Image (tube, rainbow, N blue to C red):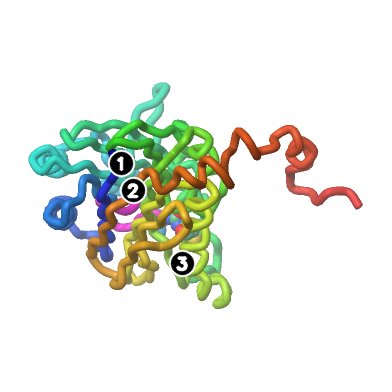
Amino acid sequence: MARIITVGAAQLGPIAREEPRAQVVGRLLALMRQAKETGCGLVVYPELALTTFFPRWLLEDPAGIESFFEREMPNAETQALFDEARRLEIGFYLGYAESVEEDGARRHYNTSILVDKSGEILGKYRKIHLPGTAEVVPGRAGQHLEKRHFGVGNLGFPVWRAFGGILGMCICNDRRWPETYRVMGLQGVEMVLIGYNTPVGLGDPYELDALTPFHNHLSMQAGAYQNAAWVVGVAKAGCEEGINMIGQSCIIAPSGEIVAMCRSLGDELITYRCDLDMGRPYKEDIFNFAAHRRTEAYGLIVERTGAEPPPD
Ligand code: CDT
């Protein structure tokens, strides 16, 4: 029997700093209902989908910082999402800022969860590759302070048997790193869910900014193809608090081909009927890891991996 996940990529337009959670949740619910109407069994929201992308600011007041984080999930403001998922029998991926007490200390993570069709949390992922800096870079047009606001994720890159397949999660900058997909690929992942907020105009040379949409797709298409998995990449897009963020949310087949893509920079749903077995010919042949990976021959290279170039 065909193993199909009809997935919805629920791109969000900007979220203003003062936009109440309830209003954001209302937008997420509208996209969830639209996804259900178009036959989806799973809807994927962006990274930090409940708030504006606050790591663009220094934010020194602890209470002000904490206001961007969720101490419980679900909580009073997000419960409606879980209730509606259960009512509609649709799963979801949601990115949010997580605040948790660990080893007697309060810790902050950039987190995503996978929720099943009965509204139960199946899995959690905490972002590992945190871009930007911990301190303000003087003279830069815009800041990206994820290293200040979040700890490095401590849950690895697990995969889950869910929705009839093997699913994994990562968050934004993770998508640029081959290790992200390969760690999940080695566990047989069949669909990788990714939320992102990708700003431009922070002060990089124009030629780098201009290539941002290309690099977005390049990374995800390569990750999909090289690991024979579907990839669903979902943006928070548009001009948010004066910073432009790319859109181009997309669904990518295990062939590496983009099969659906958002056209706007606002709230927009795209869907695709993903056949999980489409990855099989790749997993059995060109990317048959057991047959073709040569880890024993990678040793020399791994030993030299470091800051300095190889000797002459
Ligand atoms: N959110 C996130 O990880 N964004 C990064 C941009 C960093 S620019 C300093 C990304 O890789 O898209």
Q: Nearer the viewer, mark 3 or mark 2?
A: 2
x and y percent of residue 243 in the render? 38, 69
* Sequence order check, earlier mark of 1 and 3: 1
Question: Which of these two is toward me, 117 or 311?
Answer: 117
**Majority secondary structure in the magenta region:** loop
x and y percent of residue 134 in the render? 52, 50
Is 52 a magenta residue? Answer: yes
Type of amino acid under label 2: Asp
Question: Which of these two is toward me, 137 or 171?
Answer: 171
* Sequence order check, earlier mark of 1 and 2: 1
User: What separation in Å lies between label 3 and label 2 (alpha carbons)?
Assistant: 41 Å
- Image quarter hosting the N terminus: top left
Vertical side of 37 occupied by 199: above or below: below
User: What separation in Å lies between label 1 and label 2 (alpha carbons)?
Assistant: 6 Å
Vertical side of 76 occupied by 103: above or below: above
Q: Which residues are magenta?
A: 45-55
Specify the farthest residue to the right.
312
Question: Which of these two is toward me, 274 or 88?
Answer: 274
Type of amino acid under label 1: Arg
Marks 1,2: beta carbons within 8 A: yes
Is 105 a magenta residue? Answer: no
Dot 3 crowding, Cα within 10 Å, few <14, some 14–19, many 20+: some
Task: Write down the residue under mark 1.
Answer: 3
Task: Write down the residue under mark 3.
Answer: 142
Question: Which of these two is toward me, 282 or 78?
Answer: 282
Describe the element under mark 1 as helix, strand or loop: loop
x and y percent of residue 135 in the render? 52, 53
Q: Residue at x 37, y 39 (%)?
A: 167
Mark identifier at residue 275: 2
Type of amino acid under label 3: Gly
Q: Residue at x 25, y 37 (%)?
A: 115
Describe the element under mark 3 as helix, strand or loop: loop
